[in-house]
């Protein structure tokens, strides 16, 4: 499995509030958001598609990223941890990339240990949201 999800239980006034809640929970676990891709906005602008709200947040813990890069600089291609916030009908789903699945591609036990640390942090974010 490469991802795990949680449905947001708290009602939100709008999708942007839900995205902000996810960012707050990431920051509470010492994870920063280094990138944000508004997929639905891109599809609307480039293809004139009306697509449900869908954002990809690039979550990063600089200390973990440095550990990975110190072991194998090319492993930066596997960073950051992506977190998806999307509307599914009347609910908001948050899907987390499993860093173990991605970082396992580096085939290095030291990087696997970093992936375990990142996974614990993401599981804590999920618990905050659920």
Image: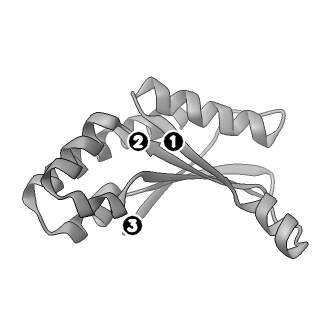
- Element type at mark 1: strand
| 33 relative position to 116: left or right | right
Distance, label 3 to label 2, CA atoms, is 17 Å
> In this picture, is 101 found above or below 47?
above
> In this picture, is 56 found above or below 17?
below
Q: Residue 6, image x and y in percent? A: 54, 49
* Residue under pointer 3: 2
Q: Quadrant of residue 73?
A: bottom left
- The answer to whether residue 22 shows anywhere in this view is yes
- The residue at 48%/33% (across/down) is 26
Residue 60 shows which numbered tag? 2
In the depicted view, which residue is nearer to us: 97 or 47? 47
* Residue under pointer 1: 34
The furthest residue to the bottom: 47
Q: Could you classify mark 2 by the number of other residues whose Cα lies within 10 Å: few (under 14), some (14-19), or many (20 or more)?
A: many
> In this picture, is 12 found above or below 38?
above
Mark 3 touches mark 1? (CB < 8 Å) = no
Mark 2 touches mark 1? (CB < 8 Å) = yes
Q: Quadrant of residue 65?
A: top left
- The answer to whether residue 11 shows anywhere in this view is no
The furthest residue to the top: 28
- Element type at mark 2: strand
- The residue at 19%/43% (across/down) is 67
């Amino acid at each position: 499995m490469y991802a795990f999800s949680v449905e947001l239980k708290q009602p939100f006034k709008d999708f942007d509030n839900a995205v902000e809640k996810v960012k707050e929970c990431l920051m509470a676990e010492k994870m920063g958001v280094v990138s944000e891709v508004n997929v639905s906005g891109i599809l609307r602008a480039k293809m004139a598609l009306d697509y449900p709200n869908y954002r990809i947040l690039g979550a990063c813990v600089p200390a973990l990223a440095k550990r990975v890069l110190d072991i194998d600089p090319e492993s930066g291609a596997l960073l950051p941890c992506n977190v998806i916030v999307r509307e599914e009908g009347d609910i908001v789903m948050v899907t987390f990339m499993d860093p173990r699945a991605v970082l396992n591609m580096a085939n290095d036990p030291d990087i696997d240990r970093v992936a375990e640390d990142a996974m614990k942090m993401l599981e804590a974010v999920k618990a905050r949201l659920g």
